[in-house]
Amino acid sequence: MSRTRHRWPEPARGAVGLAMCLLLLSLGLASAVLGWRHVLNDLHSAQALAEQHRARLEAQWLLAWGMAQWPQDPAAQQAWWDQGQSSDCPLGLDRTRLWQCRRLPAPADGADAALGGPSYWRAWRDLSRAPHVLQTEAVVARSGGARSQLQQQWWVPSMGRAGSAPPAQGWVTGACDQGQAGLAWRQVMGQIQPSQVQALSQAQAVASGQLLGTRGRNVYWVDAAQDWRTPLGSTAEPVLLVFSEAACASRCPRLLAPLVGTVIWRHACGQGLGDTPLLQAPVLGQAVIDASQVHEADRVWVMGHASADQAYRLVWPEGMDLALPLPVAGSWREGAP
Amino acid sequence: MSPRPRLSRATRGHSLVNLLLGLALSGLVLGAVLAWLTGPWRERSLLHMHSRQQQDLRWLLQRITQDLRMAEQVGHAWQRRSTAQADGFANTLRLAAQQVQWKSDLNADGLADDNECAGFEWDAQRGELERIRGCRGSTEPLNDPTVLFVSNVQWRLECRVRGPWVQRRIHLTLGLRVDPAQAEPIWTLQRQVVLRNDVPTTPWPSVCGVRS
């Protein structure tokens, strides 16, 4: 005899148990979700904070790394700057002056693989007013979105301290009759070396894009023997014009156009001066020759001016060693200006 | 009236006693589970609060450090900051028991403007650290005292002569309530911040005291 089983659904005897299970499960899930959400939030904010901190540390490292790339050897500096482009310059620079700019991408194999990409170090300097001040900037943009920017200026060996102030009468002569060659240069230029003036003139020429362009230029080193026919300088922007030994080899070039600032003939103690006057145009500022006497006809053309030395007299802090790059006090800045 | 149909045992369901017993047992189990969960839950909340405090604290220190490091910065520093003449930002650092204040050239124009005061102020009553904005006494809070109660702030200045310049360091001590609602216990944290913008030795910065 076969026994038949009821096919009714199972009774609701487990309903309470099921409800309890569901309730506990819901509580557990809610707890886990809430807890995990807090953990995630904490994790994200901790990561963001850590990323920001790393970005700042990396920017400091990048600033130091960049300065290590800058060549301290004056002979190598022009070639180093020549690799820069005008697009390397920061926005907002005064375009009436001449600038040198160089931007280097952060090395990807540096302190952190996350560096590189949009992170960079940049240096620029104002060739017209402050060739001895290097302005630097390090920008770090990490993949997580953290960003840090540091700026600092550096005193860099470029031009030494200038000599005595321009004389009121305008003429500066040497003492060749006493055997002191180069006295006039030393008196006017002080610790500034001819090679420094030559390097600055070359840098300005390259930056201005034309060999003897006048826009923004205020230092000219001339090796050619031709007479000078281009008016230079103004009372607001005096210039320095130097005719080199090469220019004065046979006969020093004559100045046939007006000049505001300083003109120097570098000749070997009177040689190359000849009997003809050097000037046929007015000089407002100072004229420097390494000879004991000035040609009588030249005297009338020169009138002294107090700002004649503005093109080469640079601001240096007192007591500073000019041989090494040093940070400019007060220039440290974090964040965009 | 038809008689009530007799259901088999399998289809009759539970009796009231069964249900009540089930409910009671379930209540007991649920209570035990909740009691078991409450402890870790509290622990977790406390840990979470401490974790938030730590993060807020690190952010706070970072913020203070960043601002202090660039204190007394001046635009066109190579022209403005010299040993020969004072600029409008050098020697503006002032330290008081509950306040540190200075000027920084925010717009980098080299001139001291009315909105270029900066610093921090501690409100001991409220346990709040505030950031000074501008020179007219306006401030913004940096912490929420219900989460991070700053119970103590100390700044100690150290001045070092480096050639014609003075380098300043601030030793910062922060005391924080572990539980914002309780006065004790307190965490104490210290950090040394080097101010990156040196000032000339002449005139000697008054904030450094008498020159030794």
Image (spheres, grey):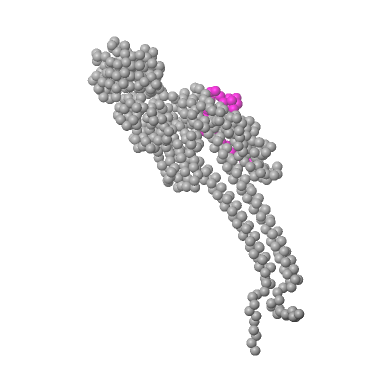
Q: Is residue A5 left or right of residue A135?
A: right
Read off the magenta span: B188-212
Give residue B181's position: percent from left, percent from top.
69, 44
The residue under the point 64% across, 84% down is: A4
**Measured along the vertical axis of the image, is residue B110 above or below residue A173?**
below
Q: How many marks?
A: 0
Magenta segment includes A156: no
> From this viewpoint, which residue is outermost toward the top?
A296
The residue under the point 56% across, 24% down is: B204
Pick the residue in front: A221 or A285: A285
Pick the residue in front: A50 or A187: A50
Image quarter of residue A252: top left
**Measured along the vertical axis of the image, is residue B208 above or below residue A50?**
above
Image quadrant holding the C terminus of chain B, namely: top right
Image quarter of residue A8: bottom right
Give residue B121's position: percent from left, percent from top.
62, 34
Q: Is residue A189 left or right of residue B107?
A: left
Pick the residue in front: B162 or A305: A305
The residue under the point 42% across, 35% down is: A91
Residue B158 seen in render: no
**Measured along the vertical axis of the image, is residue A300 above or below residue A122?**
above
